Amino acid sequence: MKKKYMIIGGFLVFLSIVAFEKVYEGEIAEWFKQPVVLNDERQSVEEVSSIVDDSFIEKEKVSFAEHERFIGLTADEVTDEFGEPKRIDLSAYGYDWWIYPTSNNSYMQIGIEDDQVVTVFLTGDIRGKSLSFGQTYNEINELLHFQKNVDVKTSDGGVYQFELTDEDVNTRPIAELGGHWVQFYFDSYTKELSSMRIIVNDVLIRQRPYSVSYRGSLPERPVFSKDEWSRIESGNARQIFDFTNVIRSRHGLDPFEWEGKVAEVAYLHSMDMSNNQYFSHTSPTYGELSDRFSNGDVPFMLAGENIAAKYIDGVASVEGWLNSEGHRVNILHKEFTHLGVGVYQEYYTQNFMTPWQL
């Protein structure tokens, strides 16, 4: 009998618990909610991702000013607005550089491929207006929030991630703007914007200006004949000369005069470095700069040299030199009057000179 009462009592307790759970279902759910879920690191990551996404939305509100819109213009539209270029140089990436040195302080290279603008390099006043992104690094970074890892997708579905070093982020960061990429070149001594390059995705991947990781395979770069390489090298040399003089003017200095014999000495040094795989002002075969000037029958009172390798093109190498103290001194040296530039594939040499006064 006692056992029977116990069974009935247990059943009644069970019914009471069920009724209590039914009535207080919401409260119980709150009491027994799993704390692990709230503290899950994956939730924290999702929250951080949301913040990053918000900043990305903010960046998208920043757009090019009208005078900086070039991508997609046809060759005829460029000619109608700016006239015939000073010259047309072949680039190492399949497009032609149309060169427009618009003034002593302003300079423009417009890259045209398949009759359309695919990239442009700008400095100074463009279409009568200065670059609109502000002047200092901090001003532009506040707008665009430069990143160390940058993802790029190409028209054929390729996915690439550029990995920028701290120096890259500080002197030549990149950001997406208006569906295209903008590479900003900063003068690390003044912390001001020096120039910028606007570029479409596919051409950016061809150039690969930073360390890159990717899925699949990298697109192949164009293959050129010896004569075509000669045109590319000659164009890069003249671009280096033109842009160097723009920088000289920016700092209140007289422009350099082109010196053909010095350019030949510079070219031979670039070719020597490339062929013999070294990087130095001292050639194992031809000696120091003074020896090479002597061999080239170039008398001088004062001489100097800048060398660079593996930059994507000539104007990029100038921005690199500008941010290196010793090279910068040569570019902005008040006593140098003449300059010769020699480029051999991805090796660049500037030879500065002051001749004896007659």
Image: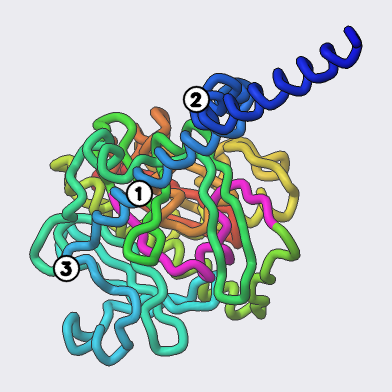
Tell me which residue sits at (41%, 44%) in the image. Answer: 172
Question: Could you tell me which residue is drawn at 22 percent across and 66 percent down?
Answer: 68
Image quarter where the N terminus lies is top right
- Residue at 50%, 39% (x, y): give it: 148
Residue 73 location, x and y as percent?
30, 82
Residue 207 lies in the magenta-colored region: yes
Callout 3 amino acid: His
Give the CA separation, mark 2 to mark 1: 57 Å
351 or 133: nearer the viewer: 133
Element type at mark 3: helix
Q: Amino acid at mark 2?
A: Glu
Nearer the N terminus, badge 2 or badge 3? 2
Determine whether 164 is above or below 12 in the image.
below
From the viewer's perspective, tell me whether residue 194 is left or right of residue 129.
right
Q: Which portion, as a residue range, is magenta?
A: 195-214
> Which comes sooner in the sequence, label 2 or label 1?
2
**Mark 2 residue crowding within 10 angstroms, few (<14) / some (14–19) / many (20+):** few
Instruction: Report the amino acid beneath label 1.
Output: Phe
Question: In the rendered image, which quarter is residue 324 located in?
Answer: top left
Residue 61 falls left or right of residue 112: left
Q: Nearer the viewer, residue 306 or 286?
A: 306
Ranked by sequence position, the earlier of labels 3 and 1 is 3
Instruction: Give coordinates of residue 352: x percent, y percent.
Output: 38, 44
Residue 65 in percent (x, y) is at 17, 63
Q: Read off the residue under disc 2.
A: 27
Residue identifier under label 3? 67
Task: From the image, tell me which residue sits under label 1.
Answer: 184
Residue drawn 64% across the image and 67% down it: 158
Asked whether 318 or 151 is in front, the reply is: 151
